[in-house]
Image: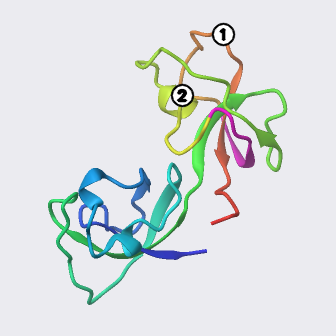
Amino acid sequence: MTQLTLIGTRLAREGETFVYQGEADACEGCPYRDQCLNLTEGRKYEVVDVRENTSVLDCAVHDGGVQAVDVEPAPITANVPSKGAYAGSKASLAGSCPYTDCPSHRFCEPAGADFDSEYRIDEVLGDPPHDYCMLDRELTLVEFAPPEDG
């Protein structure tokens, strides 16, 4: 389900994804607060439409201002333990990983996903991008379905 919000002009492109970080200190007293601060903190979103013929509004956070877009919760690509990883099942992340240079690190600690939550696997994508896991984990690359609660 799409939701109307305001985001920085640099992010206002169809297909752009971002994780909503919540209110910044500079948001205090802004007349557009209700239109900007209407998403779920920590959730990954995708811009599905940029509203045409709308004004770019001044913003204390975004140097180029903000504009109206339609967004919807986005799927999250992640590595999960291979055991039980199939489309339709629920899975959690394996846990944090200190190996930030690993090509899989962004999938082991994906933006928009929590270690303490379970997610429904929408699709199994296959092997992760690393040759071997430094933590000796058996992992599978999957796509989590976006949350159904919007």
Does 79 sit above or below residue 64?
Answer: above
Q: Tell me where residue 48 appears, x and y as whole percent.
A: 46, 72
Amino acid marked by disc 1: Asp
Amino acid marked by disc 2: Pro
Q: Nearer the viewer, residue 149 or 9?
A: 149
Mark 2 = which residue?
Answer: 129
| Relative horizontal placement of residue 122, taking residue 14 as reference (left or right) | right
Q: Tell me where residue 84 appears, x and y as whole percent.
A: 84, 33
Locate the N terminus by quadrant.
bottom right
Mark 1 = which residue?
Answer: 136
Assess whether mark 1 and mark 2 are in contact (beta carbons under 8 angstroms). Answer: no
Does 15 sit above or below residue 139?
Answer: below
| Relative horizontal placement of residue 3, taking residue 116 as reference (left or right) | left
Quadrant of the image occupied by residue 58: bottom left
* Front label number (2 vs 1): 1
N-term-proximal mark, 2 vs 1 = 2
Q: Badge 2, how many Cα within 10 Å: few under 14, some, many 20+?
A: some
Q: Which residues are magenta?
A: 115-126
| Relative horizontal placement of residue 123, taking residue 10 as reference (left or right) | right
Q: Tell me where residue 5 appears, x and y as whole percent.
A: 41, 73
Main SS, magenta region, reads strand
Q: Tell me where residue 100 appears, x and y as whole percent.
A: 43, 20
Q: Badge 1, how many Cα within 10 Å: few under 14, some, many 20+?
A: few
Q: Secondary structure at mark 2?
A: loop
Q: Nearer the viewer, residue 11 or 149?
A: 149
